[in-house]
Image (tube, rainbow, N blue to C red):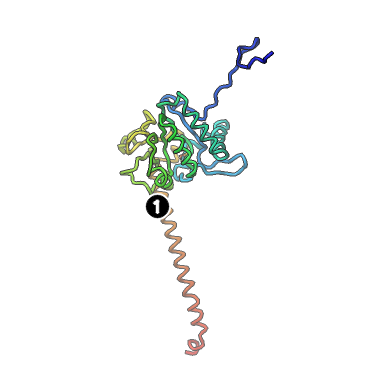
Amino acid sequence: MPIAPACSGFPRKGRVVMAARKWLLTQNSQLRKLGVFNWPLPAAEVKMPNGRFMNVCPSAGACRDLCYARTGTYRFANVLAAHTRNLMYILERPQEWAAEMKEELKHKRYQGKFVRLHDSGDFFSADYLKLWLDIMQESPDVIFYTYTKEVSLFREIVEPDVPANFRFRYSLGGREDRLLDLTRDRHAEVFPDEDAVAAAAYETNSESDLVAASDSLRVGMPANPIRHLQRLQGRETFGEIQRRQDTARAERLERARAKAAASTTAAAVEPVASKATDDPVLLAS
Ligand code: SF4
């Protein structure tokens, strides 16, 4: 007698519990309202299961200390574990991850929809970025968007040939802000509050994060209402803090260079002086 396949009907007792499909892409409450899907990674430095640390946001600058994704719910053990699992999957089995992502994106729930890459984390390597570009090419009916601080990586790899379904926006507060032309590069700035966004004539993302995927040159966002981060930020924008830090660093470097040059000169002069002192002719005179 053939054995009935498991799917042939309900068992006599109990209910069939279908395993829920595990999606790679998720939705947080804010993005769900917009019908946007999300691919999150851990923010900044993360401790890997092997005990080593990895920096997932290599070009983070001033934003790092003000990062909403390094506090609150993002630090809940289950949330951080899920984000770290995403990262480990890419690091350990990149081709398998990309194939699964492509397959998932064929599902009807994604057609004509937006996927935001990294509401936390960033493009941590050229190889990882290229995997996404490949996924985008194979998912023409999905629109991808992202904020990124990886300016030089995008200049080199993305800007020469941007996929038609990819909208990216540079976000200020990174170590590569100095490479941006704010009159030309689409960018986002974090302001202390909504009034400051309006005063600077930036287009706010408060109504919809999808403004990030628009052609608007300047998108502004009020800082997240996280008290200790708001105190730390004060009345400056992320970009202003970064410029202040860059200037201070440049001045420190300049002082160090001047000091090094002065001690090199002194070292060059010193042997001459001591030689002169030892010179019998000079001693005699
Ligand atoms: S790049 Fe984004 S996720 Fe990373 S530390 Fe900065 S604000 Fe946070």
Q: Which residue lies furthest to the front in this view?
A: 1
Q: Is mark 1 on a helix, strand or loop?
A: helix
Compare residues 57 and 94 and report the one nearer the observer: 94
Q: Position of residue 114 (x, y in %)?
A: 41, 29
In the image, residue 7 sits, relative to residue 112, either above or below, namely above
Mark 1 and ligand 1: say if the CB distance to the nearest ligand atom is below 8 Å.
no
To which quarter of the image does residue 77 belong?
top right
The residue singled out by tag 1 in the image is: 247
Does the rendering let one see residue 260?
A: yes
In the image, residue 77 sits, relative to residue 6, either above or below, namely below
Q: What residue is drawn where x is 49% and y is 90%?
A: 284
How many other residues sit within 10 Å of disc 1, few (<14), some (14-19) or many (≥20)? few
Q: Where is residue 22 in the image (x, y as percent from the top left)?
A: 55, 26
Does the rendering let one see residue 194?
A: no
Q: What residue is drawn where x is 56% and y is 36%?
A: 89
Quarter of the image with the N terminus in it = top right
Question: Which amino acid is tagged 1?
Answer: Thr
Compare residues 184 and 101 and report the one nearer the observer: 101
Q: Is residue 90 left or right of residue 243?
A: right
